[in-house]
Image (cartoon, rainbow, N blue to C red):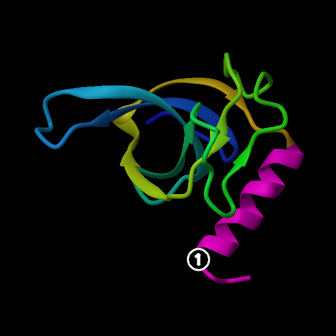
Amino acid sequence: MQNYSKSKVVLVKYPFTDLVNFKVRPAIIISKGVYNDIFIVPLTSKTLFLRESEFILNDWKKAGLNIVTAVKRGIYTIDSKLILKEIGYLTKDDFEKLKLSILHWLELK
């Protein structure tokens, strides 16, 4: 298993419900998890109608992204085998904003 670290931006194979087909989308690793399970937060290029605590990354280019990208509300556990490759990392400021958003989503703040 490759060693993935927090704040890395990766491309992930998101399976459809048929578990045969998939789409590739970017995500942020927020924790290694246990065994091969990794916790991620999804990203989106659809930034027009963001919900509360979703936000546009300030440094999306440093994150390895080609266009303006936002953090989507959601925390998912995936098997590390679904990660295709690392493309970048979040800057400290963007990762701090992400941590605050997660606390808000979980009603811990």
Q: Residue at left 50%, top 58%?
A: 74
Q: Residue sitting at 73 percent across and 28 percent down?
A: 63
Instruction: Quarter of the image for the N terminus: give it.
Output: top left
Residue 47 image point, x, y percent? 64, 38
Q: Classify residue 102 by image quadrant.
A: bottom right
Question: Relative to the observer, which residue lies in front, 82 or 21?
Answer: 21
Dot 1 lies on which element? loop
- Residue visible at 57% across and 35% down in the picture: 46
Q: Residue 56 at what x, y percent from top left?
A: 74, 42
The quadrant of the picture occupied by the C terminus is: bottom right
Above or below for 94 versus 62: below
Magenta-drawn segment = 92-109
Q: Which residue is mark 1?
A: 106
Q: Hey, which residue is sitting farthest front in the picture?
A: 48
- Number of callouts in the render? 1
What secondary structure predominates along the stretch shown in magenta? helix
Tell which residue pokes out farthest to the bottom in this image: 108
Front-most of 25 and 11? 25
User: Within the magenta stretch, is there residue 23?
Assistant: no
Q: Residue furthest top?
A: 66
Can residue 13 be seen in this snapshot?
yes
Instruction: Give the left or right position of residue 70, taking residue 77 as reference.
Output: right
Q: In the figure, is residue 25 to the left or right of 6?
A: left
Going by the numbered disc 1, the residue's amino acid type is Leu
User: Based on the displayed image, in which of its 4 quarters is residue 83 positioned?
Assistant: top left
The percent position of residue 91, horizontal first and vertical second, equals 84, 39
Give the vertical position of 89 relative to 6 (above or below).
above
